């Protein structure tokens, strides 16, 4: 079983020696056919030197250096594209995700799962703010998105070649990789683990990066915010109807100021119309956006039966030989079986 490990690293010079030692131990049972891919995401410290040193000590380590800082998800994508394994294990460089869980993940995959993701049972050494925002983020995301994205999971996971190939077929630029795996489908399961504190350095996700990440995720997997106007327009129309009843009632009872009824009705009616047209625009913009991603329509998960040995051919040859194209296809299939 060929195994690839992919780690995006941004200014992680202190973590890398420790990371590599623990990874090399974790992949011991598969070491004959394994590779560890470290991606340097345009670090400004000595991360690249640390990678070169790691490669000298352990030849299983491969380094890839990006020309500039492109962000966690892009760095991870670069590593995933370089990976050649039949199973791919991804984790963060700061050892918040314990590599020692790999054998358990491998076991789950032996049982037929395509994606075994780590679910954070507990997060150690993180600020209350980070925990609270993460908690809210995953709940909002699930409420808004049409895809069921597992809660409290990161990109820490073991995936099969076919699920990775599916994700790599998605050409979108704003990447939310854990969501893309969820969207791709196949058999998925979570494995609980305790998220430890960083071994060294600081978080590379300041508030600004967290907000960008959250926006990418929400807009990438949902067009619901665009549809809010449509819903509001229905509320607004309902209000208009009640308003009309009230206005006409008052008119009949003659206790109105001149012009009041027409102004009130016009305002409520036209705001409803405006919201409705905005909603229609939103619907089209949302569709344009989804189309522009050019995601594959489906991925095949299983198949039974075989395709015909030859495509049906009603050409002159089939007619001349006096047997139907299907018969000839069946015969060639039988011949092939005999030969093998
Ligand atoms: N990372 C990266 N490029 C960036 C920011 C982060 O490759 O621009 C890497 C980082 O080195 C780490 C992983 O992404 O391996 C997760 O980042 P971090 O641990 O800082 O995030 P947190 O765990 O605090 O959410
Ligand atoms: Mg971290």
Image: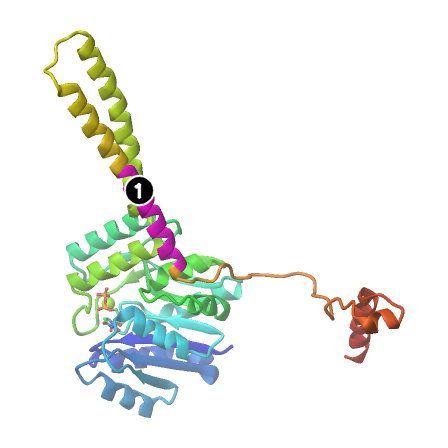
Residue 166 vertical placement versus 219 (above, below): below
Residue drawn at point x = 31 percent, y = 79 percent: 39
Q: Give the overall secondary structure of the magenta segment.
A: helix
Asked which colour scheme the image uses, the reply is: rainbow
* Left/right of residue 3 with respect to residue 130 in the rendered view: right
Q: Would you name the residue on which mark 1 appears?
A: 279
Residue drawn at point x = 22 percent, y = 83 percent: 47
Tell whether position 173 is magenta.
no
Which residue occupies the extreme front position in the image?
A: 258
Numbered label tally:
1
Quarter residue 228 falls in: top left
- Quick one: label 1, few (<14), some, or many (20+) residues within 10 Å? many
Q: Position of residue 48 (x, y in %)?
A: 24, 86
Foreground of the two, 26 or 36: 36
Q: Which residues are magenta?
A: 275-291
Which residue occupies the extreme top position in the image?
A: 253
Q: Position of residue 315 (x, y in %)?
A: 78, 70
Which residue occupies the extreme bottom position in the image?
A: 56
Disc 1: residue Cβ within 8 A of ligand 1's nearest atom:
no
Quarter residue 336 falls in: bottom right
Q: Quadrant of ligand 2?
A: bottom left
Q: Position of residue 185 (x, y in %)?
A: 47, 58
Residue drawn at point x = 43 percent, y = 72 percent: 88
* Left/right of residue 37 with respect to residue 50 in the rendered view: right
Foreground of the two, 176 or 246: 246
Residue drawn at point x = 74 percent, y = 70 percent: 310
């Amino acid at each position: 079983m060929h195994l690839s490990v992919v780690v995006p690293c941004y200014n992680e010079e202190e973590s890398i020696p420790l990371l590599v030692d623990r990874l090399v131990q974790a992949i011991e049972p598969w070491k004959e056919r394994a590779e560890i891919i470290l991606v340097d995401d345009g670090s400004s410290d000595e991360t690249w030197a640390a990678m070169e040193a790691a490669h000298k000590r352990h030849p299983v380590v491969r380094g890839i250096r990006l020309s500039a800082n492109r962000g966690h998800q892009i760095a991870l994508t670069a590593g995933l594209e370089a990976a050649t394994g039949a199973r791919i294990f991804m984790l963060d460089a700061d050892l918040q995700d314990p590599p020692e869980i790999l054998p358990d993940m491998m076991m789950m995959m032996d049982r037929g799962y395509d994606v075994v993701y780590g679910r954070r049972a507990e997060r150690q050494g993180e600020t209350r703010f980070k925990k609270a925002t993460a908690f809210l983020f995953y709940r909002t995301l699930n409420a808004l998105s049409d895809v069921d994205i597992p809660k409290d999971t990161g990109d820490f996971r073991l995936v099969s070649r076919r699920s990775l190939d599916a994700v790599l077929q998605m050409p979108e630029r704003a990447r939310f990789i854990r969501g893309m795996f969820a969207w791709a489908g196949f058999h998925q399961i979570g494995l609980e683990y305790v998220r430890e504190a960083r071994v060294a350095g600081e978080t590379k996700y300041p508030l600004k990066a967290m907000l960008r990440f959250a926006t990418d995720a929400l807009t990438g997997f949902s067009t619901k915010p665009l549809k809010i106007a449509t819903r509001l327009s229905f509320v607004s129309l309902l209000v208009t109807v009640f308003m009309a009843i009230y206005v006409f009632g008052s008119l009949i009872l003659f206790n109105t100021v001149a012009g009041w009824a027409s102004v009130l009705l016009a305002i409520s009616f036209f705001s409803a119309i405006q919201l409705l047209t905005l909603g229609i625009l939103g619907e089209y913009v949302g569709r344009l956006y989804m189309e522009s991603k050019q995601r594959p329509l489906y991925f095949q998960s299983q198949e039974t039966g075989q395709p015909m040995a030859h495509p049906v051919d009603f050409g002159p040859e089939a007619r001349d030989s006096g047997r139907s194209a299907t018969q000839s296809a069946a015969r060639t299939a039988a011949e092939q079986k005999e030969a093998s």
